[in-house]
Amino acid sequence: MSRRAEGSGGRLSGAAPPKAPSGPAPPAPPPPAKSTFTVLFDGKAIEVPKHLNLIEAAKLAGVEIPHFCFHPRLSVVGQCRMCLVEIEGMPKIQAACTTPLKDGLSVRTTTDKVKNCRAATMEFLLINHPLDCPICDQAGECTLQDNSFGYGQQFSHYDERKRQYPTFDRAMIGPHVVADMTRCIQCTRCIRFCEEIAGTGELTFLDRGGRTLVWTHEGKPLANDWSGCAADVCPVGALTVREFRFRSRVWYLQKTPSVCPGCNIGCNISIESRENVVYRFLPRLNPEVNDYWLCDHGRFLSESLNLRDVEKATIRDGGKVGEAHVPAAVERIAAEIRATLEAKGPEALFFLGSAHLSNEENFLLRKLADHLGCANRDVFADRSRTRRIKSQTEWLSGEEAAANLRGARDMGATPGRGGFGLDALISGKALPEVIFVADANFSEIADDAEKVAALRRARFLAVAARTANALTRAADVVLPAASLPEKEGTFTNVQGRVQRFERAYLPKPPVRAHWELLLLLANALGFGDRNWTPSDLLARIAAEVQGYGQMDEGALAGGGLLKKGDFAWKGAP
Amino acid sequence: MEPVLTARVGKPNSRSIETYLADGGYAALRKVLTGGWTPDRVTEEVKKSGLRGRGGAGFPAGVKWGFIPKDTKGKPIYLLCNADESEPGTFKDRLLMEQDPHQVIEGIIIASYAIKCRSAYLYIRGEFYDGARILNAAIEEAYAKGFLGEDILSSGFSLDLTVHRGAGAYICGEETGLIESLEGKRGQPRIKPPFPAVQGVFDCPTIVNNVETLACVVHIVNRGADWFAKIGRNEKNSGPKLYCLSGAVNRPGVYEAAMGLPLKDLIFGDAYGRGMKNGRKVKAVIPGGASANMLTAAEIEDCPLDFDGVAAKGSMLGSAAIIVINEDTCIVNAAQNLSKFFAHESCGQCTPCREGTPWLYKVLTRVEGGEGRPEDIDLLERICNQMANGMTICVFADAAIAPPLSSVQKFKDEYRFHVENKRCLVGPKALVAV
Amino acid sequence: MSHTRYRIHEAGEPRTFPPAAMARIEKILKRYPNRQAALLPVLWVAQETWGWISKEAAEEVARVLELPAAHVDGVLSFYTMYNLRPVGKHLLQFCTSISCHLAGAGSLIERCGKRLGIGLEETTPDGKFTMIEVECIAGCDRAPSLMVNDKYHEPMDEKKLDLLLDRLSKEA
């Protein structure tokens, strides 16, 4: 059914050989082959890479060719007939997506014929399309709406019964995807996604002609690891995500570029929030990491970011746990550390970083420990089943259940010379006086009674946390810490790529970002500038951490599109 | 003209290989394989003959064969015989396959040799159960006699031929729909280019030819390209042709004649249709199957039934299926019936056809049923004009608009009558009495 | 318009090809360069084995040909001759395309429906007859054309239809 449109060879532009003054002219060297084609869009010529589809080439020229079924990562099918354009030298209207690029191709997109054909396709698409906009989630990010508004007619000539698929409306086609097949425009993006990217082929056309619809084999639902992406590629509201259904109109959502916290692949996401509540994740394009995709595991972590048990700092005194102001709680921790430092030395301290925390945060923790002369530091991440995502060119996999184990290790949040790590702590081999856990939600260990008991053997246990667990309940001091959307920073992914996540909204006071809490503690212990921001910390990382040079916010803007391997950490200090 | 393609039809045991051999069958194959003909010589002969495809498109067969790339980069070449005959009004291939299967088989073998094909398929529509059985039996006979299989007639040329049954889809008669179906998929036509000769079935160079076209090849080899080219009005419209006559005539049937038989002769000639049943008058004729524009009674004058002759009348010869409609038939009713066919058979891939064909059917049903509105007539034309001429992946849409568009343009008064009077001009659904 | 084909009925029990059918399938597979190309012929074997192709039969075909079940469904529902639900012993296929329509297919269907007490797409309670309309079956010169299972009965008329139904009703 599908065929990638092929380019025919381009004409080489020839240069006339120079005329020699006398004697036969020497043979001219062959002109170098161009790596681009010259394509004209409405008379304006541009150079386009040969491998592009004509629709993509048009975009480079600033020309929009409306389309539905074309997707840069899926095979070309030329079915929707929206991308029709005039090609000079061809009498009939042509689909842009199936027209091979060639040198000198001249495309017209503004003629009356093109306008009429677009309007015709829009009319055909809308004659059976239900007027669901008021109740359809896709409204506001719907290609049908956009193209109708841009290229369609004001009214329809259709006055017959619309075809409907009542048993396939409001129906679960998979655990995460709701189908409303009456809205389907039969573009086959979802079918091609499941066949070509996911490789699972759950979806198919059934029946034919005007009765065609998309469905699964009964008993084999749309349940691959990336089923949410099928809803992403659907240009209308025929496939929508169940978890998001009816929760918000999309134009109210604030979009914040971020990185998925689900595993160490670090897929780029957009955190979509409204009034400080996360409503959903959407994938954010990064051809070198996750391309257009996001796995269901990561996508549906979005809800968990709204969970919060710890809203205020608490201090346990004697048997009682009482609320405290954050500065007071921090000072309490600092006092314990100072006292222990004096009485027992830095060997009696232990600092636990987190693979869920940013490079900036783990760096600050390490610097604080250094300042105190403490080599007892560590970081740990749970293992997960292999997660996979397809970049533009290859499959990436991740087996860590957190985004930043690699970055945390690169920052040096690992045992120093002569120091001990988490293993020793839990096994009982080491017993410090004071344990500071920068993120009590760092692992399932924090909810394991036995392991928490090991940590509790320390005289003083302080943590920063967002949600409650056995560790927070056992701690002496709990500081209220921010969730991912409430702070900014960088993660280092499985490829060694440093990627920035932005802040969507500020945490509700007195909750603070982990880096803020760490900075307060550092300041109280005589280290660090009280005005430091994550940017300052990043600059220091660039200066001090091997392999992380040449990094600043400019370089990271847009989500870490940096070359692989520039900052691969070669080993612990 | 002496029967060429139908020479054996109606004779006793016409299906058996013994009868075929006794009648000079497989002599053409012998000539080609043991008489020193190169594959290219066969192609040249077919090109010289002017043989144009008999499936509907009328593309010169020899030229099509020449599109196979010289270097196929190791890919095998396939010949597909298109026996999916589903165009309403067409039944000539059924006749050939059921009555004289070996003629078709021999044509397939010779064509396969010409294009260097090693494995050929005969895609036959599912409804032709008998046809498939008869062909399979004949193929078995051909294998047994060594006309199929390894090293045919010790020539070094080997060919396997497999009958592949369709299962009810007109669109599988479109060459790329056929290819998709042969590959075990929904028969949805492909984007062209690339063309099948370059990239066809299983991604290999492929030639798709109609049953009658391949049967002609036998006779071109036997009697020469010049003989073939001389039959008919001119060398662009040459050879013997099978015409399928149906509708309101006295003697419907398959008739063989030289290309260019006048349409009136076919309808009224004593050797052919013998005139209108019950003495009724011609109202309209569809000259080339449901996909062809209707002709009015006036337009059937001076209409040679060949590709250029019918094209000159603003229609097409297509599959040479001539359907005759008499004065008792409501044209709107006929158009509505034809639109139902196209709405059923649209594959559903692309927007204009998927949405347009049911829309046409719905409007025509309303108009035919007495619920038409004045604007419906213009609406039908509008819909048709939005569907064709490059709007779609294949020309099914161009075929689908032929009945409504040509009937609205040529019989507008009848449509107006329907809309204004809520009934047929010629009485309630008048049909030819059985 | 006509019936839809997106409901593939369940047989209610698993389907496995009997050895004779598997032998046929093995022979079929030899004629094609890959397994998917054998899908239409194998679906015919399934229909000949069970009379119709159920969801379970589709799964068996998918298993034998190593194809996704959804792909088999897509093909199954595209082609009208595969029965997606049980049909009567005699499948009466009335052509209603233009030449047969002009020859009175409509009144034949009406008569047949009245006689059997069913409408199009329906099966008689005794399971003997299912009546459907089909598009052109290339019997236009012998219009109106009727197929019963795999046999043509043409030209058909009301008298012949009565006799045919009489005969078929009497069959065991």
Image (cartoon, rainbow, N blue to C red):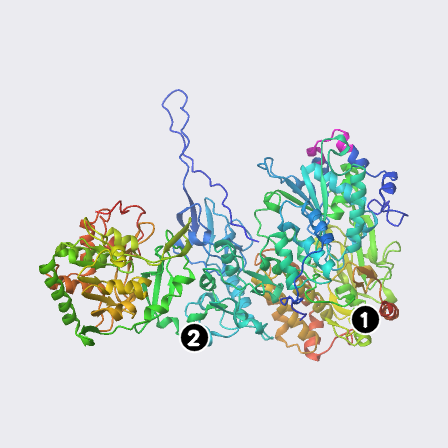
Q: Is residue B377 visible?
A: yes
Q: Is residue A330 shown above or below A545?
A: below
Image quarter of residue A166: bottom right
- Distance CA(mark 2)–CA(mark 1): 53 Å
Residue indicated by mark 2:
A246
Which disc number belongs to residue C108?
A: 1
Q: Foreground: A555 or C104?
A: A555
Q: Foreground: A298 or B191?
A: A298
Residue range in magenta is B31-42
Category of crowding for the residue at label 2, using alpha-carbon neighbours closer than 10 angstroms: few (below 14), some (14–19), many (at least 20): few
The percent coordinates of residue A27 (x first, y second) are 42, 25
Q: Quick check: A55 left or right of B237?
A: left
Please state the chain letter of the residue tagged with numbered disc 1 in the rendered image.
C
Q: Quick check: B33 left or right of A126?
A: right
Secondary structure type for disc 1: helix
Q: Is residue B315 visible?
A: no
Residue type highlighted by circle 2: Phe
Residue most toward the right? Answer: B12
Q: Foreground: B382 or B176?
A: B176
Image quarter of residue A404: bottom left
Instruction: Please report contact status of discs 2 and 1: CB closer than 8 Å, yes or no.
Output: no
Q: Is residue A473 shown above or below B203?
A: below
Secondary structure type for disc 2: loop
Q: Main secondary structure of the magenta part?
A: helix
